[in-house]
Amino acid sequence: MSHHSRRDFLGHAGLGLGAATLGGLGLRLDAASAAELDDPQAPRAPHFPAKARSVIWLHMAGAPSSLDLFDYKPELVRLAGKPLPDSFAKNLKTATDGGVGNLLATRRTWKQYGETGAWVSDFLPNLAQQVDDIAFLKGCKTEGATHIISSLKLHTAGLVPGRPALGSWVQYALGSANPDLPAFVVLPTGVGAAGGGRGAVIWNSGFLPAAYQGTAFRKGDSPILHLARPEGVIETEQRNTLDLIAALNEHGAIGRTGDTELAARSKSYELAYRMQKSAPEAVDLSKETAATRELYGIGAKETDEFGTALLRARRLVERNVRFIHVISGAPDNSVDSWDAHNNLEKNHGVMSRTVDKPIAGLLADLKSRGLLDSTLVVWTSEFGRTPYGQSGNGRDHNPWGYTSWLAGGGIKPGTYGSTDAIGLRAETGIVDTYDLQATILHQLGLDNRKVTFQYQGRQERPTTVFGDVIKEIVA
Amino acid sequence: MKLTYQTLIATVVQFALAAGALCAAEAIDVDGDLMRGIDDTAKSLDSDVAQKDAKAAAADARSLVETFARIESHYGQKPETADAVGFAHHTQELAAQALKAVEANDFDAAGDSVARLTRSCKSCHEVYKKD
């Protein structure tokens, strides 16, 4: 047995043993058992058979307008230019500076698509061809009126920093299905960080151990900062150094069987070493065909970066990464993000062109490879935008009613829920962010009420005390 | 004289009991502070149930029963708040169910009651919490 193959064998055998042991624990991980996990990457059994193996979470940072993409409202067109009627405005507390302008009609052309007859505007001509694989949640609502607060709630179920991201909970509950890659990868895109609510605070592990935080991949051939072997150090030197460190740590561990931090650190060195090969390979698109690259819009100015991120996401799914968090950003300095307080037509024109073809390509590609059944794709944002105008040609933040959607991963296509006649408030099939999170966990085989971690004397859950699975969209 | 003294004591005791009863039914401010307190107690109850801490869970559940009784009373004295009375009454019942389950050491049932209780909170907020 070669040096490498023996090491690989031991690594994989260790993971298998961890899985068997934890499967026996029935996933009731509390602080004590979590602290005993000497390998946070070890795979763990779900509560019940999962329908999805991986999640691709598409975060449209900045808040796109459902009223100009998916939620067609003829009544808003009819009332355009008039003040917001009292019948819709009752108890409405607007919190941003823009005030409440007159109602603003969409300027888009709308059509129904597919067998499901879903409405999609001409901002998204490519995605419109995929609607028969999509479950639209048109009665979404949340809390807060600022990007950062609502983004924290969307990603961590908390209104202030400190709680773990959903991807961290998934990694904590299920471990990693690939010992050579992190189970929670983040793919930020775009220039700058405008739009708010898109920094590391939405993918960190909060009160969970740091090993569960999202790993942000950079653009380019070397996706993880400081991962590459330093210049001037050859592989043998690095291997010898790691072997010496491992031997010293093993010696130091004698008589300290409870020192999980030392064990975790030793494992992290080995994971980083393995990732020096696995991570660049996972994001290397050179072996992808020209047709595949074109499908994602790679090579075209507006879609190149986002398309590259989504093709990377598909490759990570193929390598069993559990949770891939993609964050949309502006392709250039012509707009900031989806945050269209003014000139919505220009803003959403740029942002839609950035994401439309890549997302449609992702769905089609996953489907053609037989991966969509086991991959849950989620399209969402911190909130939507108001039917009343702002700055004459923009829209303000709307946490009261907006659209998210899911595709694949055991989700039943169609339209669930609705907003009122002008798209201001969720009216039927109301889905809070906690419910969206609970549904995602459910598709991964997890009961949101049974994933717990003890912190400051309390049993904390991914969705706090809330969260109901949206049974109507589960196939 | 002795009789008079006993009567006086009895009167004082009766007065004290009446005052206590009045305090119990005393109007409360149904405001953000009260709701944050309920939110914290519900989270604590949820955690206690998960940890099967019967004593702490019972204390939290009892506190919620009492608080929702007062909220029901509060809305009962206001016009056109029948649905609020209903929400408060229903939530009080769910807290009482959680308490009963905890006292029977049935933590699965208690957990279900707590989940229904938090849903009831959200249902009420759909109507009464200003956006």
Image (cartoon, coloured by chain):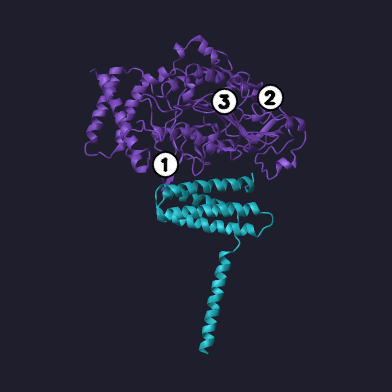
Query: Residue pushed farthest bottom?
Result: B1
Instruction: Name the kind of residue labelled 1 in the image.
Output: Thr
Q: Which chain is cyan?
A: B
What is the distance, in whole Å, between disc 3 and disc 1 at their CAs? 31 Å
Tell me which corner region of the image, top left, top right, bottom left or bottom right, holds residue A252. top left
Tell me which corner region of the image, top left, top right, bottom left or bottom right, holds residue A270. top left
Whole-percent x, y for residue B104 in the image: 41, 54
The residue carrying pointer 2 sits among few (fewer than 14), some (14 to 19) or many (20 or more) residues within 10 Å by Cα, namely some
Whole-percent x, y for residue A360 in the image: 56, 19
Q: Which chain is purple?
A: A
Instruction: Name the kind of residue labelled 3 in the image.
Output: Ile
Q: Is residue A464 left or right of residue A29?
A: right
User: Which mark's residue is nearer the viewer, 3 or 2?
Assistant: 3
Secondary element at image label 1: loop
Who comes first in sequence, dot 3 or dot 1? 3
The answer to whether any part of residue A318 appears in the image is yes
Who comes first in sequence, dot 2 or dot 1? 2
Whole-percent x, y for residue A249 in the image: 26, 32
Nearer to us in this view, B51 or A10: B51
Residue A345 is tagged as 2
Q: Is residue B103 left or right of residue A93?
A: left
Read off the residue under disc 3: A134
Q: Chain of mark 2?
A: A
Query: Residue pushed farthest top?
Result: A290
Residue shown at 74% from the left, 42% from the top: A86
The answer to whether marks 2 and 1 sit on the same chain is: yes
Read off the residue under disc 1: A452
The residue carrying pointer 3 sits among few (fewer than 14), some (14 to 19) or many (20 or more) residues within 10 Å by Cα, namely many
Residue shown at 63% from the left, 49% from the top: B128
Q: Height in image: A34 above or below B24?
A: above
Instruction: Name the kind of residue labelled 2 in the image.
Output: Glu
